[in-house]
């Protein structure tokens, strides 16, 4: 096992110490089944650390969409596809606010997709196709094969280059700095781009993942063709095609391969995807009022919901309510409609109405994060910090990288006027929100502040110290 680790050329001290930690675990470490290409448990730990680092970095460098409802729509697809692999649990999914078509997966279970990727797709199965292709690259560990091009730099460097590659493509060219220059050079050398064989393999295996998780493999071929038509009109190639060269040969192969699968109906109904797509275009500022009005006038449900969300974002609660009422006449049951309704009420300071609009639905779907967090916002407005904390903690305990959750906990902790630990708790929650948004420096500052305030309280000091040490250690990992 350690041999594999060394062979990968990784010199992270944290990785080595995690290897030592495992010798005290009762499960015999050599019995751990190895996954694709001889990667064992230690590597999975290391990949998780890298994935989390990239998660923070992407949040730090990009404008991301923090919308539990939307994130969870894609997370569902990601989880379904990932469950067909041996890659373990997902770290997270990030929706980047960018109209360009791009998406990437990172070892450790992270997936990032641009809003432009969603708005260019015709169905959720097409989005699933891109995810499956990217996940196949990770599952087949293509990155470690192309790693030879980055001798000695290790996986983390590669992850940095993946992020840098996305940054390098940004039109303003301001972000990324020195890292970007190196990345552009790497891109020019085509070192980062996958080989034709790797592309073929990712298409083939990705389609198998799609099929076994209930998505239509034809959609991957569809997306390639749509993109090929779109890019022939552009003077530049979207990043996605820079790193995943698309040839006519590859397109026809993908089509032939897709035809070999038994027919799979599209995973969700088209109206549902239209809602996701138009909502994405609204919250990523890709849609304009005129466009949405046309859809709404045609009494398209997705258009009505999106136009309502559009007015809500502008603080025009009257028009938002009007469009939502039209949508409700067609279907009153959609979760997004309930969420928008609650927000319209909250915007008008009708907190009790907001509560009534969501409580029954939240109780019937207690696992739904978007509904739960909306209820938590209401609890906070009702000055019920205990109820708020209890509800958020159910989700944070399962996924501590949830920035939205930490921000809500920070607000709730601030309401606990009687609690002597109030300021310390606010700082601890703020530190987590900052940390997972990629602001490692200020996260550590918040915890140092909490540490000073906790002096004399041994239990609290121990908690703060432990978390601080982890953050400081992880901050040293450079990508
Ligand atoms: Zn590819």
Image (cartoon, helix red, strand yellow):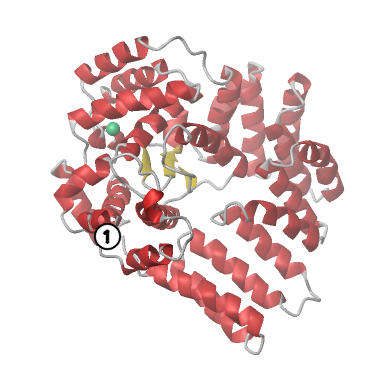
164 up-or-down from 231: above or below: below
**Where is residue 246 shown, x and y percent of the image?**
24, 26
- Residue 61 figure quarter: bottom left
Residue that badge 1 annotates:
177
Residue at 62% from the left image edge and 59% from the top image edge:
407
Q: Position of residue 333 (x, y in %)?
A: 75, 27
Residue 431 versus residue 357: which sits nearer the camera? Answer: 431
Residue in the image at 46% along x and 23% along y: 212
Q: Secondary structure at mark 1?
A: helix
Q: Position of residue 265 (x, y in %)?
A: 52, 13
42 w.r.t. 96: above or below: below
Taking 470 as reference, is 188 left or right?
A: left
Instruction: Give the quarter of the figure containing the C terminus.
Output: bottom left
Pick the residue in front: 205 or 76.
Answer: 205
The residue nearer to you, when weighing 449 against 7, is 7
Question: Residue 64: x percent and y percent?
Answer: 48, 48
Q: In this rendering, would 399 be left or right of 160?
A: right
Q: Quadrant of ligand 1?
A: top left
266 displayed left or right of 187: right
Cβ at disc 1 under 8 Å from ligand 1? no
Measured along the vertical axis of the image, is residue 355 above or below residue 450?
Answer: above
Instruction: Please indicate, yes or no, whether residue 235 appears anywhere in the rendered image.
Output: no
Q: Is residue 419 left or right of residue 196?
A: right
Residue 219 falls in which quadrant of the image?
top left
């Amino acid at each position: 096992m350690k041999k594999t680790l060394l062979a990968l050329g990784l010199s992270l001290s944290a990785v080595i110490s995690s290897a030592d930690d495992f010798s005290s675990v009762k499960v015999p470490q050599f019995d751990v089944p190895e996954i694709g290409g001889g990667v064992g448990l230690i590597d999975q730990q290391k990949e998780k650390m890298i994935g989390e680092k990239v998660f923070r970095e992407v949040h730090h460098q990009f404008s991301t969409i923090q919308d539990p409802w939307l994130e969870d729509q894609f997370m569902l697809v990601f989880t379904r596809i990932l469950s067909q692999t041996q890659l373990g649990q997902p770290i997270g999914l990030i929706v980047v606010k960018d109209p360009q078509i791009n998406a990437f997966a990172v070892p450790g279970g992270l997936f990032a997709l641009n809003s432009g990727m969603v708005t260019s797709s015709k169905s959720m199965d097409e989005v699933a196709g891109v995810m499956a292709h990217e996940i196949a690259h990770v599952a087949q560990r293509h990155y470690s094969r192309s790693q030879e091009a980055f001798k000695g730099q290790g996986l983390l460097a590669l992850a940095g280059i993946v992020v840098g590659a996305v940054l390098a493509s940004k039109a303003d060219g301001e972000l990324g700095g020195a890292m970007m220059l190196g990345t552009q050079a790497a891109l020019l050398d085509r070192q980062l781009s996958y080989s034709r064989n790797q592309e073929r393999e990712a298409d083939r295996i990705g389609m198998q993942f799609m099929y076994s998780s209930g998505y239509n493999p034809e959609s991957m071929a569809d997306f390639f063709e749509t993109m090929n038509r779109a890019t022939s009109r552009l003077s530049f190639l979207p990043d996605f095609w820079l790193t995943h060269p698309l040839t006519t040969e590859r397109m026809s192969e993908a089509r032939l391969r897709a035809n070999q699968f038994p027919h799979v109906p599209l995973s969700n109904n088209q109206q549902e995807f239209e809602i996701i797509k138009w909502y994405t275009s609204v919250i990523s500022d890709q849609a304009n009022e005129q466009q949405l009005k046309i859809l709404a006038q045609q009494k398209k449900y997705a258009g009505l919901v999106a136009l309502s969300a559009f007015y809500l974002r502008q603080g025009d609660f009257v028009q938002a309510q009007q469009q939502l009422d039209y949508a409700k006449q067609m279907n009153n049951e959609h979760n997004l409609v309930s969420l928008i309704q609650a927000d319209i009420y909250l915007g008008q300071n009708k907190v009790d109405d907001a509560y009534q609009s969501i409580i029954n639905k939240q109780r019937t779907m207690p696992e739904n994060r978007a509904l739960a967090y909306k209820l938590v916002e209401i609890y906070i407005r009702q000055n019920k910090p205990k109820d708020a904390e209890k509800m958020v903690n159910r989700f944070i305990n399962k996924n501590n990288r949830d920035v939205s959750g930490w921000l809500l906990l920070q607000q709730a902790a601030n309401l606990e006027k009687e609690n002597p630990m109030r300021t310390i708790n606010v700082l601890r929650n703020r530190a987590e929100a900052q940390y997972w948004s990629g602001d490692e420096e200020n996260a550590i500052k918040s915890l140092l502040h909490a540490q000073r305030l906790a002096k004399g309280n041994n239990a609290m000091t121990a908690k703060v110290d432990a978390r601080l040490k982890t953050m400081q250690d992880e901050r040293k990992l450079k990508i």
